[in-house]
Structure formats: C-alpha cells, structure tokens
C-alpha cells in the first residue's frame, strides 16, 4: 500500500523574578538581533537597568558569544548622550548578559506608526542621530543597521541609538585597515528596506553607509513612510540600486527644499556623493535649525528635477543582480510569516550536559509545530538533499547559522532554533525565529521549567507562544494545541528513542529504524505516534500484516495525539486496517481541508483512488500532492503507476526522470520504472533496475520477484521459479517474513494459472506457514481455488469475510473473485457470473495485496474463464480483450500473456477459425522459448492442432 509519513527553536525562557549577578529581572521589554532585552533592577545602586541576554546556543555558541562581547566593547567605546550607555558585561550560569542604561519611552518606529513628524522634530532628532553616529564612527564603530526600530526616544525627547549587534569595528585611526565585523559572516548584513547600495553589492562598508541609512530614517520621519514603500518586495533590490525614491515634498508638501536637499544628499547611490561624515550631516542640520521654514524657495523645482533624474548606474550585471535578488529576497511581513512561507528547524542546542535532551527536544518541537495548519516546515528529506547540494554531509548538525544558509538555498523564509540550559536546579528553554535572508529577529519565546519532568510541558507552552508571534491566529493556536506530553510521550527516554528512529529512518531507511521505534514503544507502550510510525515503516517494507497491527494500536491510542496525528492515524486505520476506502477518503478530505498545505492526505487519497480504479482522479490528487511536496519519492512512484494504468507510458517515464533529476530514491520508483520498461520492451532498462537493487534490503527482493514475473510472462517457468526463490531468500535475510511469503504466494498463484495444481498447493501451504496475514491469505485463497483445493479456499475466504466486513476491496474485489473461482471448479459458471456483479466499480483497480508491480485484473480474467465454460465466446473475448487493452495496469503480470490464449479460445468457440488461429499463433510466438512441459501450453498446442 502506498502510505505516506507527513514531513516531519527558540530562546531561553527567562527568568523573570530571578537574579543575574546583582540584577533582579523584572520584565521582558524587547528583542534585538543578538538577544532578548529585559528590564532589571540593580540591587546595589538602586536603579533600573536594561539587561540584554544571549542564550546558550544562539547562532553558533562560542562565535556568538564573541560577537556579543564585541557588541559590549563597541557600545562602551562609543560613550555619548545619544548612544545607550553600557554599565557592565558578565556571565552567570552559562548566560552572557550586557547591562545598559534603562531608557523609558518609545521607539521611533512606534512614534512613526501614527504620523509623520514636523520639520522641527525631523531636524532635532536627525541632528541627535547624526551626532550619535559621529561619536560611534570616531571610535571605529559602524552600526550597519540604523532603522527606526533601533532608535529609542526618552520621555524628554532625547534620541538614543540601540542594538549594535550588527556593528562593524574598525580602527579609528585608519579607514583602510582591515576591519572586524561583529557578525563574522560574509553574508549581506542589515535590514533590506534600510540598506545602502554597497551593502547589497557586498562592497566596502564605512561611515558613509550609516549616513545613507540615516537619510532613510530622515525620509521616513519627514514623510511618514519608507522610501520605495510603493515598490513590490520582489523589485525592492533593483529600486535601492537604481532608482531614486519619490521626492519627500510630493508626499508631504510641508517638507522644505533644504530638508529635501539634505535627505537627497544622504541617499546618493555612490558613497563619494554623500556627506563624507556624520559630523558634516549634523552641522548641516544644525545650520538650518534656526532658519528652518516650510516655504519652498526658488530651488524647489530644480531639486525635484534632480530627485527624478537620480538613476545612478551601478556596475553590476543583470545576471549578478538576479542572483543577488534571489538570495536576499523573500516576500515577508516584519515580525510575522505569511501562510506561503517555509521555515527550517535548526537543531535544538543542549547546554545541559544531559544527553537525554540530544535530538529529543528537536523532535518534540517538530511534532508540536506540525500541529499548526499555518506553519510549513521544510521536510527532513529536503533538508538532507539541500545539505548535499551545499557540499555538506546530509547528517551534519544543523546549527542556526547552517540552518539559515540552508534556508536561503531552499527558498525558505525563516529559521527556527531552540536551546536549553540549566539555571541552578531549573531549566531555561528558549525558541527563536529569524529571517533567513537578513538574519532579522522575527520572534522569540523564553520560559523556565522547574524540573526535568516538566521540560516537555514547558516547551509546548513556548511553542504555542511562538506560533502566535509568527502570525498564526489565536483561534488556530487554541484549536490545534495538544499538550506535547500528549502529542508525543511523557517519557523523555521514549522520545529520545523515537527521535533517533526518525533520524535513522531518513538516513538509512525503514529497516534500520524499526528496532528503534520498537525501543520507544518498550519505554512507553502507550506512545501512539511511535506505533503509527512502526505501522508506516512496515507497510512501506511490504509487511502489511505487521503494519496493520501497529496501526490498530495507534488508532486505539488516538486520543493521546495531536489533531493532525489523529486525522492521519484515523485515515490509515480506516483505509488499511479496516480497508474501508470510502471512510478513509472522507478522513483524507477532512485532513486536507484542515491542513491545506499538507500534501500527505492528497497523496494517500490518490493512492486510494488507484485501488478503486479511478485513475484520472488519482492522477489529479497525486499531482496536487507533488505540487505541495515536490520531493516526495512515494508520490512520484504512485504517479508512475497511475499514468501507466491510463496507458500514458511516456508520461510515466517522464515522471520517473523528474524524480531522478531531484535525486530521489525509492525502491517503488525503480520497480515502477521496471514495469514501464517492460511495457516498452526496453530490456536494457529493466536490467539496469535489477542491477540497481542488488544487495539492497527491501529493493533486491522486489526486483527479483518482478524479474520472475517477466520470465513467467514468456513461459520461462524454470527461470521464474529460480528468481522467486532468490526473492524469497532475500526478503527472509532482511527479516521480512510477510514479504517473503508474498513472493512465495505470487509464485504459487502463477503455478495454479499455468495448470500445476500440486506445486501451487505446496507453495501456498509454505507461504501460509511463513506468514498467515491478511494479504497472504487473500492470494492463498485464490491460488487454492484456482488449483482446485476448494475446501481450504472456502475456509480462508469465510474467515476473511468475518474479520473484514467493511473492507472495500476484500468484499467487492477479492472475495467475489475467490468465490467465483470456487464455483467455476464446481462446474457452476453461471453462479460465478452472478457473483461478479459487485466487482464492476473496482475491477480495474490497482488492488492490494501487491506482491507484484501493477494491478491484476483478476475479476476480469476469472469472469472470462466463466464465459468460456458457458460457451459464450463473444463475451469471453470481450473480457480477454479488455485485459489486453489495459496492459498498463497489468504491466508484466503473466495474466497479460494468458489473456491472449484466452482470446484465441474465445474466437474458437465462436467458430472464428482464422482469427482463432492467428490469436493462438500470437500466444505461441510470445511463448516461443517457453518450457515445453507447462500444462497450459500443452493444452493450447492440442487445441491449436484441432483447428488445422
């Protein structure tokens, strides 16, 4: 069965009320590029201060701490009334913190939210900004992120420059000496709407860069909006590099010509055309302060013409510009995500020295965030593929910095990471989200756990808070917010085993992961998600009996999971355990409605439509699934089968090639291409697929069994038997007993159809002894019925009917076929035809059990045999022709060859001797090298001789 597993952070949560050094933390007041800011009380000097705290694990541990220390150094060097004063820098309990003056008031960003400023305010605040920057530049500090959000206004109107986390240090005496960036990265630094052209181009950064951004702030103060606010986000880089913004006077008629001139000079594209120092800008602003007037002078018209003509030519090729734009540019809202945004979960940083948290909290956070219909998390498979493209190992640790780089590569919007540290006997947990392209802080959440046992509960609360801050509606968070210990497990050890199993599953496949999933269940027998994961892993390994046992248990525990998991488990239970495809489809549709950005329900809905023979619907759903999850190998494999069932072989092959171009690997994909190659008589491609599978557990046995069917299709029964034995042995070596029994029952059914009743019964008995599961029993009953063991066949069929009363395909496809085969052997073909009345909606389906590639069309084939017994040759011929016409469903199933013999027999019954001879000859040509002692071949030759 084609089952899918849905693809499958943060910042310490402090500590309000606790004390760091002699600073008692009172409340959180904001977040900067390098940490979270709290108001604290200095117990020694009896004053309020601001504490900026760097959580452990933020960015890249030690390098992040170095950058944080340099920020403290930069602020201490630039001591000035318009720069936040640094009081102290210290470390306690693994937390680095910077102590600054506490500045009551609002940010300039908040002030500008309601209105533009008067010219008097623009000049006054602009002068203070320029003077503060001048002091910083004199001490070799370039801010690089001047924007209204980083400028605070005190209650008495003084401007203070904050957040030097992105600053660049250069020796004050020499502008040519090598400088040192606080960010220590080669990425473009800053906030896109407030960046100078040289920042975008990766050019030299100096004091004139801050002058350009100061001009942007002046523009916003004067007009009430940012330059290029009217430009689409996707065109913003080009506008910054090449265009002049709308003249301020056009947006605010009260802007004077002098202020417009000053702003224009700050915003020159080339640094040499701007003010060459912040001091020069401050002098110019002070010069007009007393004489400032709102009336325009004679130069206003000329100035507007100058603004309109400023389209500086930048030496950058269009190709380089497009690449730069792709790297830097993602549509976004500040401090929130859009529903179309993708996020990357970086690794959870464990600073506690307790290994139980390793990988465990990352897995817990993944499960928690996957509850959200708003967030779209980059799948683990895509993460591994992107790491490979980056020249990194697919199992490399995903630090926040690597995560940010990967996020940009994968076209994501934000990177999320988490950290956990100890604070005395307690735990500090935090979550942080930052924009991939700029590194801008988007949201953070921090919280404290009183003990180890409460960590998961606390993490869940932090994740809920972060979801709201990222833009998810409160109603959505409240609706889809199962407690983490319920959505996963209360046992950290069980969760650790589960997280290791998932990691192993991505890296080494289902077989390697199964023992670890079992370990998780041993540690917590009520771990519902682990039971479901075991079910899917066994299903995709061709072990449906074991899969159904685990899915049954997961369904019994469905109240212990999130809403999303409940939908998933319920859909799998009804579709595969009970076999009720109609009910399963209802749940898949509900799942898709609740989580419209999840491709899994659409993919499985497509698989169910394939089982039901509704291939056009199947293709439609699978294409939509792949639109959402373009790197899902199972989806491509299913689409290959669906196109083949519609006889659209070239499209099926193209789908396989698309999957290979994406470097997706899955045994089903290769098996399906083998089937397409068979239909196109491409023996070389078939051999390549067999060679690919050699030695690979879960793949080798599948391709060997397919090769056995191909040999049987051409009557090479001895070769087919040998290949089936190899397939059985390969599956048993991989401890896949049910799969091994499946290959054996496939061989038994083939023997029965070829007329070898005794070998068929013997092989069936061996298969049932190996694994008497539902799917093995289905084909065993059919093989026994076709081989004449009617009592045994009827007993198995009755048991299936009793145990699976709601199973769509058992009751409307397989049991009618088995019972009809029994009636045929009882020489009651009319009863057989009557039984088949219920199969019509499903008999062209790709019906499970699938111990071969493609479907079987067994109801059509057995009904055709009943028509032959009734001497209704025309109706028998129509059924056999139907099989031949749908060879894309059968692929290399031997019934496709036997249908040609059936067609010859049907024409002979009608007295169409010439046509019958031709059809017999076609069959003999197909079996020209067949083993001569096959009973059905001997019978065919005798029949043909009578037509001479």
Image (cartoon, rainbow, N blue to C red):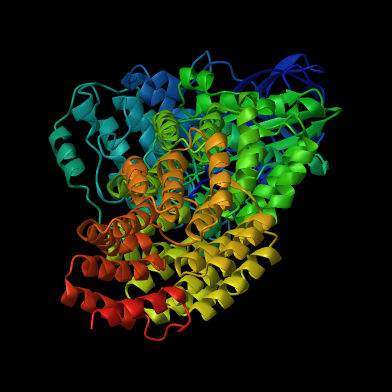
Residue 679, quarter of the rendered image: bottom left
**Position of 778 relative to 749 (above/below):** above
**Position of 624 relative to 99 (above/below):** below
Q: Which of the pair 288/889 is nearer the observer? A: 889
**Position of 459 relative to 546 (above/below):** above
- Residue 83 in view (yes/no): no
- Residue 524 in view (yes/no): yes
Q: Is residue 191 left or right of residue 34?
A: left
Q: Is residue 928 left or right of residue 40?
A: left
Q: How many marks?
A: 0
Q: Which of the pair 600/947 is nearer the observer? A: 947
The residue lying furthest to the right in this view is 425
The x, y position of residue 383, in whole percent, is 54, 53
**Position of 331 relative to 30 (above/below):** below
Quick one: quadrant of the C terminus?
bottom left
Q: Is residue 716 left or right of residue 56?
A: left
The x, y position of residue 669, in whole percent, is 46, 62
Residue beneath the point at 23% across and 24% down:
252
Q: Which of the pair 342/653 is nearer the observer? A: 653
The x, y position of residue 218, in whole percent, is 36, 31
The x, y position of residue 520, in whole percent, is 75, 41
Residue beneath the point at 75% across and 16% down:
17
């Amino acid at each position: 069965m084609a089952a899918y597993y849905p693809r499958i952070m943060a910042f310490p949560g402090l500590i309000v009320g606790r004390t760091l050094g002699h600073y008692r933390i009172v409340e959180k007041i904001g977040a900067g590029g390098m940490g979270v800011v709290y108001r604290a009380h200095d117990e020694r000097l009896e004053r309020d201060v601001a504490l900026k705290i760097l959580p452990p694990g933020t960015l890249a541990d030690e390098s992040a701490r170095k950058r944080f220390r340099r920020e403290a150094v930069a602020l201490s060097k630039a001591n000035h009334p318009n720069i936040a004063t640094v009081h102290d820098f210290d470390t306690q309990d693994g937390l680095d913190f910077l102590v600054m003056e506490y500045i009551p008031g609002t940010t300039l960003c908040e002030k500008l939210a309601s209105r533009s400023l008067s010219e008097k305010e623009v000049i006054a605040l602009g002068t203070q900004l320029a003077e503060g920057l001048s002091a910083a530049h004199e001490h070799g500090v370039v801010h690089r992120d001047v924007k209204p959000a980083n400028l605070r206004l005190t209650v008495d109107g003084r401007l203070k420059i904050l957040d030097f986390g992105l600053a660049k240090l250069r020796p004050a005496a020499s502008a040519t000496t090598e400088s040192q960036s606080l960010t220590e990265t080669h990425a473009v630094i800053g906030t896109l709407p407030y960046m100078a052209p040289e920042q975008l181009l990766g050019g030299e950064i100096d004091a004139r860069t801050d002058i350009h951004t100061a001009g942007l702030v002046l523009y916003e103060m004067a007009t009430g909006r940012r330059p290029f606010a009217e430009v689409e986000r996707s065109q913003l880089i080009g506008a910054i590099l090449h265009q002049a913004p709308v003249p301020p006077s056009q947006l605010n008629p009260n802007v004077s010509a002098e202020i417009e001139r000053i702003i224009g000079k700050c915003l020159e594209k080339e640094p040499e055309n701007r003010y060459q120092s912040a001091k020069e800008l401050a002098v110019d602003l002070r010069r007009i302060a007393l004489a400032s007037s709102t009336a325009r002078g004679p130069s206003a018209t000329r100035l507007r013409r100058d603004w309109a003509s400023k389209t500086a030519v930048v030496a950058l090729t269009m190709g380089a510009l497009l690449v730069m734009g792709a790297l830097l540019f993602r549509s976004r809202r500040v401090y929130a995500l859009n529903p179309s945004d993708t996020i990357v979960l970086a690794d959870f940083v464990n600073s506690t020295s307790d290994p139980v948290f390793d990988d465990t909290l990352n897995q817990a956070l993944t499960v928690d965030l996957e509850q959200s219909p708003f967030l779209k998390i980059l799948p683990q498979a895509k993460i591994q593929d992107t790491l490979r493209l980056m020249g990194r190992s697919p199992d490399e640790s995903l630090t926040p910095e690597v995560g940010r780089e990967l996020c940009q590569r994968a076209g994501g919007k934000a990177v999320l990471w988490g950290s956990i540290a100890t604070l005395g006997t307690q735990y500090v947990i935090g979550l942080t989200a930052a924009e991939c392209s700029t590194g801008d802080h988007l949201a953070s959440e921090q919280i404290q756990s009183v003990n180890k046992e409460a960590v998961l509960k606390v993490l869940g609360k932090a994740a809920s808070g972060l979801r709201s801050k990222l833009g998810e509606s409160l109603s959505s968070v409240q609706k889809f917010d199962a407690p983490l210990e319920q959505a996963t497990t209360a046992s950290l050890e069980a969760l650790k085993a589960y997280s290791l199993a998932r990691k192993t599953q991505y890296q080494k496949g289902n077989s390697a992961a199964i023992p670890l999933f079992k370990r998780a269940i041993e540690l917590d027998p009520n771990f519902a998600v682990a039971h479901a994961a075991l079910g899917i892993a066994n299903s995709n390994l061709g072990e449906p009996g074991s899969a159904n046992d685990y899915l049954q248990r997961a369904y019994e525990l469905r109240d212990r999971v999130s809403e999303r998991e409940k939908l998933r488990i319920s859909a799998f239970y009804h579709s595969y355990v009970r076999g009720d495809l109609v009910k399963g489809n209802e749940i898949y549709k509900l799942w898709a409605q609740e989580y419209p950005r999840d491709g899994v329900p659409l993919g499985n809905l497509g698989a169910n439509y394939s089982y039901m023979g509704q291939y056009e619907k199947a293709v439609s759903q699978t294409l939509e699934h792949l639109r959402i999850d373009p790197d899902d190998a199972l989806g491509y494999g299913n689409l290959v089968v669906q196109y083949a069932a519609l006889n659209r072989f070239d499209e099926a092959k193209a789908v396989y090639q698309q999957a290979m171009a994406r470097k997706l690997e899955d045994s089903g994909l290769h098996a399906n291409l083998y089937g397409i190659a068979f239909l196109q008589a491409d023996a070389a491609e078939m051999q390549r697929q067999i060679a690919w599978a050699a030695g690979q557990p879960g793949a080798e046995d599948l391709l060997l069994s397919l090769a056995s069917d191909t040999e049987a299709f051409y009557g090479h029964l001895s070769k087919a038997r040998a290949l089936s034995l190899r397939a059985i042995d390969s599956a048993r070596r991989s401890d896949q007993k049910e799969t091994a029994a499946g290959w054996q029952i496939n061989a038994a059914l083939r023997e029965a159809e070829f007329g070898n009743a005794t070998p068929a019964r013997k092989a069936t008995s061996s298969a049932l002894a190996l694994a008497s599961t539902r799917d093995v029993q289905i084909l065993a009953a059919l093989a026994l019925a076709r081989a004449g063991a009617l009592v045994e066949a009827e007993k198995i069929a009755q048991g299936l009917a009793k145990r699976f009363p709601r199973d769509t395909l058992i009751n409307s496809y397989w049991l009618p076929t088995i019972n009809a085969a029994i009636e045929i052997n009882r020489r009651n073909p009319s009863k057989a035809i009557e039984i088949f009345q219920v199969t019509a909606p499903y008999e062209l389906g790709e019906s499970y059990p699938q111990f071969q590639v493609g479907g079987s069309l067994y109801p059509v084939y057995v009904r055709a045999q009943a028509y032959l017994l009734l001497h209704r040759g025309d109706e028998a011929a129509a059924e056999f022709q139907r099989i031949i016409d749908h060879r894309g469903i059968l692929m290399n199933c031997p019934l496709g060859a036997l249908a040609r013999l059936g067609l010859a027999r049907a024409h002979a019954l009608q007295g169409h001797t010439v046509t019958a001879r031709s059809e017999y000859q076609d069959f003999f040509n197909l079996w020209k090298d067949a083993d001569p002692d096959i009973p059905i071949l001997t019978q065919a030759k005798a029949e043909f001789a009578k037509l001479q």
